[in-house]
Image (tube, rainbow, N blue to C red):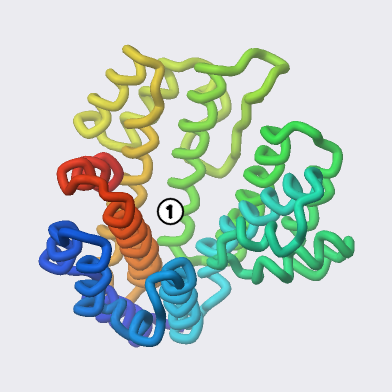
């Protein structure tokens, strides 16, 4: 099955996302009301015409949910898109488990969850509380079983991460799509870099955060056992010149902020470059990432305008996050 229709369709959809001029129009608005009014001149128009500003969270969730439904409907192999959805399911399951331990009501738990997963949050809550996770993904079932043995939040997160990567590696192994294989290898590599630099910086042996290594990337466990080797791997993956400032900051301050940002940038760059092949699944990944990015930017802008943040400070935040 080919992407002669799905790839170009996703490309066309991406062209309808926020343009530079539209973003500038939102940023330069003098108030929340003006920014919200300007949003009517963007692709968000169809979502806000019958809604009030108080329904902003619902509006933004609807944008992402519609993008997801569209991609599933046009993809020749929609199960490959589970690579995108499942990370939200594992995040949601972790939130459900932690919240259940604190006896938080189910309706409150659902509000903490992303709606971008394969399974609706209310379904995951129901299956978990009823002990019927077997009806979902087998790796979600394993994650739930493992997490029941833990009390520490970091341990629960560890179980979610390990089983998420097991789930997506299984997808890659059972399919021949080269973009998906390369994408999963890349996110494994960058996860190993981030998780183990965090461990080496803040953790001690046999204390959280524990060392963690996910196989399936481009390097072996031995490369995660010291900072210098990890930083070398990070520079090889993300580009030596692009990573130099990040590694310098880390060496000087121990902060992972710029490394985290560069990892996200590199994933975005990989997807963008891959999406030039319009007749592949890559444009579908690129479109969904673009939608998520637009939604997050709009959320930040409108919250900033509502709280009276200056345009200068708002632009500084967006530069730090997205530029």
Spot the residue most to the right: 131
User: Mark 1: which secondary structure?
Assistant: helix
Q: Nearer the viewer, residue 151 or 168?
A: 151
Quarter of the image where one finds residue 106: bottom right
The spot of residue 242 in percent (x, y) is 22, 34
Name which residue lies at 50% across and 39% down. Answer: 191
Quarter of the image where one finds residue 174: bottom right
Residue 228 appears in the picture as rendered: yes
Q: How many marks?
A: 1
Spot the residue most to the left: 21
Crowd band around label 1 with a 10 angstrom C-alpha radius: few (<14), some (14–19), many (20+): some
- 171 above or below 194? below
The spot of residue 4 in percent (x, y) is 33, 85
- 53 above or below 45? above
The spot of residue 268 in percent (x, y) is 32, 53
Quarter of the image where one finds residue 152: top right
In this picture, residue 266 sits left or right of residue 131: left
Name which residue lies at 44% across and 82% down. Answer: 70
Q: Nearer the viewer, residue 222 or 28?
A: 28
The spot of residue 212 in percent (x, y) is 62, 30
Q: Nearer the viewer, residue 89 or 59?
A: 59
- 90 above or below 275? above
Residue 271 appears in the picture as rendered: no
Name which residue lies at 36% across and 64% down. Answer: 295
Q: Which residue is mark 1?
A: 182
Q: Nearer the viewer, residue 39 or 159?
A: 39
**Quadrant showing the C terminus:** top left
Name which residue lies at 85% across and 60% down. Answer: 129
């Amino acid at each position: 099955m080919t992407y002669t229709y799905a790839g170009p369709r996703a490309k066309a959809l991406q062209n309808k996302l926020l343009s530079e001029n539209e973003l500038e129009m939102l940023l330069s608005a003098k108030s929340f009301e003006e920014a919200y009014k300007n949003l009517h001149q963007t692709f968000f128009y169809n979502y806000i015409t019958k809604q009030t500003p108080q329904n902003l969270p619902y509006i933004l969730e609807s944008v992402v949910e519609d993008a997801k439904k569209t991609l599933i409907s046009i993809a020749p192999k929609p199960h490959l898109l589970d690579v995108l959805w499942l990370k939200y399911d594992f995040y949601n399951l972790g939130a459900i488990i932690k919240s259940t331990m604190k006896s938080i009501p189910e309706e409150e738990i659902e509000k903490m969850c992303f709606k971008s997963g394969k399974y609706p949050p209310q379904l995951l809550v129901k299956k978990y509380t009823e002990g019927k996770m077997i009806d979902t993904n087998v790796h979600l079932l394993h994650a739930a079983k493992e997490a029941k043995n833990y009390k520490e939040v970091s341990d629960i997160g560890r179980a979610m991460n390990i089983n998420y990567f097991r789930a997506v590696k299984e997808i890659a192994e059972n399919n021949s799509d080269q973009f998906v294989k390369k994408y999963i290898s890349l996110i494994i590599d960058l996860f190993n870099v981030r998780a183990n630099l965090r461990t080496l910086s803040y953790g001690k042996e046999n204390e959280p955060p524990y060392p963690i290594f996910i196989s399936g990337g481009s390097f072996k466990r031995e490369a995660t056992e010291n900072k210098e080797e990890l930083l070398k791997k990070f520079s090889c993956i993300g580009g030596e010149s692009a990573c130099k400032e990040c590694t310098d900051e880390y060496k000087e301050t121990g902060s992972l902020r710029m490394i985290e940002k560069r990892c996200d940038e590199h994933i975005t760059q990989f997807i963008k470059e891959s999406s030039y092949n319009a007749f592949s699944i890559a444009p579908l990944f690129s479109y969904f990432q673009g939608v998520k990015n637009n939604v997050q930017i709009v959320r930040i802008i409108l919250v900033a305008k509502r709280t009276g943040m200056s345009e200068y400070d708002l632009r500084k935040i967006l530069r730090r996050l997205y530029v």
